[in-house]
Image (tube, rainbow, N blue to C red):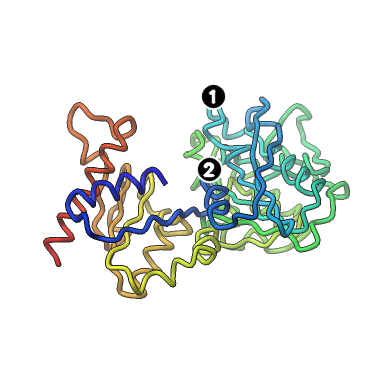
Amino acid sequence: MRATECLIDGWREIRPTDTAIALPMADGGEGTLDVVASIRPDHTWMTQVVTGPDGRPVEASWLMLSDQTAVIEMARSSGLPLMNTPDPIGATSFGLGELIAHALDEGAIRILVALGGSATSDAGLGALEALGATISRANSSASGACGVVSIDPSGLPNPPKEGITVLADTREVFFKAPEVFGPQKGAGDSDVDALTEAFAHLVTLSPTPHVDKMPGSGAAGGCAWALAAFMRGVIIEGSRYLGNMLGAGRLLPDVDLVVTGEGRLDPTSTKGKVVGYLYHLATAQSVPGAVVAGVCDQPEVVSWPVLTLTELASAHEDSIHDSEKLLRRAGVQLAREFSQRN
C-alpha cells in the first residue's frame, strides 16, 4: 500500500483534483494476508512459532476468518528473506506444514494457502513431513527434494471439510520449477540439474496422476504439487482469486488509467502475477495503463508504458533506499504524460 500512496502523492502534484483509488492487490505471494484482511473485517490474526526455511524458528502470522477459513501465506513461514544465505537444495517448507497443522487444530474447515516468495525448492516435501508423511531418502541426513526414495502418506491428516485451495502466483508446471525459479533462490546449473532429476522421480511417487501437469503446480518450488497430489488441494491463480474478491473487474469501466507494478518486470510477470492479471483485465476492456517496476528485463511483455525506478534515479540515488521518493517521481511523470495525451 505504501508504494501506491507514494504514486498517488506524485500524481496529485500535477493533477490534484483527480480521483485516485488505491486497490491493494496480491497474487498469492507477499501481502496476501494484508489484502484479505482489508477485504474481510471478520478476521482474527493468529501467530505460531514454526520452523523457518533454514531450520531456525520464526514467528509466522496467519488469519482465521469468522467462517472458519484459515488463510496462510507461505512467505511468512518459508520466505526467501528469512534466509541468511540462499540454500536451494536444503531450504525446507516444514514451517508451512506446521501452520497448516495448527490451522486444522484450531478447527479450520477451509484453508487458503498463498504460495509465493518462498525460499524453497523442496517440492513441498518439508510441508508434507510436518503434516505427518514419512519420506525415505537415500541419504538419511539429507533434506529437500533430492535423494528421495519413497513417500508414505499414511500419516497425513484428512483435508479440512471444505478442502484446501492453493493460490499460485505462477502458471508454471511442476517440472519447470527448478529451471524457472531455482536460480532466483540461489541455484547454480548443477543445482538445477539435480533438482530437475529429483522432480522427475517425485512425479512417479504421486498418488494422484497428472497433477504435475496442472498450471501452477510449480509454484513455491513445487509446493503446489505436493498439496494437490497428497492433500487434494485445488490449484487456482492467486491474482485472479484475489482480484475477484476485490471486485477489480467492476471498477474498470469507470477508470481512465490503471497503474500497477512489481519489483522486477520480466516474462513471468504476465503468467499469474498481479501485473499480468490487471494488464489482461484492463486491455480486454480497452482501459489504458502503465507499469512501474524497480527494474525491467523485458518491457515488451506488456504494451503499456513502463517506468523503472532505476531509470528515474539520479547518480546519487538508490532505487531501493530511495524508493518512496522515486515512486512519487514516477507518479509525477505518469500524470504529466497522461495530461499530454488527454
Q: Residue at x 23, y 51 (%)?
A: 12
Q: Residue at x 77, y 36 (%)?
A: 137
Q: Residues within 10 Å of mark 1 (few under 14, many from 20)?
A: few
Front position in the image: 144 or 323 = 323
Residue 123 seen in render: no
**Left or right, residue 102 beside residue 88:** right
Residue 155 seen in render: yes
**Left or right, residue 256 beside residue 181:** left
Residue 140 is situated, as x and y percent measured from the top left of the image, at 78, 29
Report the residue that reaches farthest toward the left.
340
Q: Specify the amino acid type for callout 2.
A: Gly
Residue 102 is situated, as x and y percent measured from the top left of the image, at 77, 43
Q: Quadrant of the C terminus?
A: bottom left
Quadrant of residue 269 within the rendered picture:
bottom left
Residue 188 is situated, as x and y percent measured from the top left of the image, at 49, 34
Q: Specify the amino acid type for callout 1.
A: Asn
> Rounded to the nearest whole Å, what is the CA distance between mark 2 and mark 1?
15 Å
Q: Residue at x 15, y 54 (%)?
A: 336
Q: Is residue 156 above or below residue 53?
A: below
Determine which residue is flagged by label 2.
Answer: 117
Numbered disc 1: secondary structure = loop
**Left or right, residue 71 beside residue 301:** right
Q: Residues within 10 Å of mark 2 (few under 14, many from 20)?
A: many
Determine which residue is flagged by label 1.
Answer: 84
**Left or right, residue 210 beside residue 205:** left
Residue 316: mark:
none
Numbered disc 2: secondary structure = loop
Quadrant of residue 123 within the rendered picture:
top right
Quadrant of residue 163 within the rendered picture:
bottom right
Circles 2, 1 touching at the beta carbon (< 8 Å): no
- The numbered mark, 2 or 1, whose residue comes first in the sequence reads 1
Q: Residue at x 72, y 30 (%)?
A: 142
